[in-house]
Amino acid sequence: MNEITITHILFVSTALFFIGMYGLFTRRNMITMLMAVELILNSVNINFVAFNKYLYPGKLDGVFFTIFVVTIAAAEAAVAIAIIINLYRSHQSIDVEDAGEMKY
């Protein structure tokens, strides 16, 4: 029977990480960049759970780290969206290149 090994899980995690990095470096829209950061954090969460399952199956350390990262990601998303909304209200743009030229 086909079994999912740690290699398969790490491949998916690596793919998510590099998709997130590509999105972070190539996009100019702040919302898209925020989603790319969330992809990177989710790939880290997959690593935490995978290594916890295969290296320390009796412990829950990886799961606790994952819950902590999800909590931090939720707070980061809330603050980032508030900043993006404020920036859009004042300058009618959420383009990163336009944000660099703004005068306060």
Image: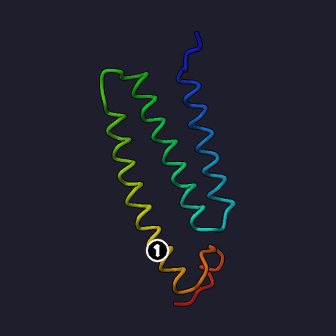
Image x and y of residue 61, in percent = 32, 33
Question: In the image, is residue 93 above or below residue 44?
Answer: below
Residue plotted at (59% across, 86% down): 102
Query: Is residue 8 left or right of 44 when viewed as pictured?
Result: right
Going by the numbered disc 1, the residue's amino acid type is Ile
Using the rendered view, name the quadrant where residue 103 is placed.
bottom right
Image x and y of residue 50, in percent = 46, 29
Q: Residue furthest top?
A: 1
* Helix, strand or loop for disc 1: helix
Residue plotted at (55% across, 20% down): 4
- Disc 1 marks which residue? 83
Q: Quadrant of the N terminus?
A: top right
Q: Residue furthest bottom?
A: 104
Between residues 71 and 61, which one lies in front from this camera angle?
71
Image mark count: 1
Between residues 7 and 84, which one lies in front from this camera angle?
84
Image x and y of residue 12, in percent = 59, 34
Query: Is residue 74 left or right of 21 when viewed as pictured?
Result: left
Residue plotted at (35% across, 41% down): 65
Question: In the image, is residue 63 above or below residue 1?
Answer: below
Question: In the image, is residue 50 above or below residue 84?
Answer: above
Using the rendered view, name the quadrant where residue 98 is placed.
bottom right
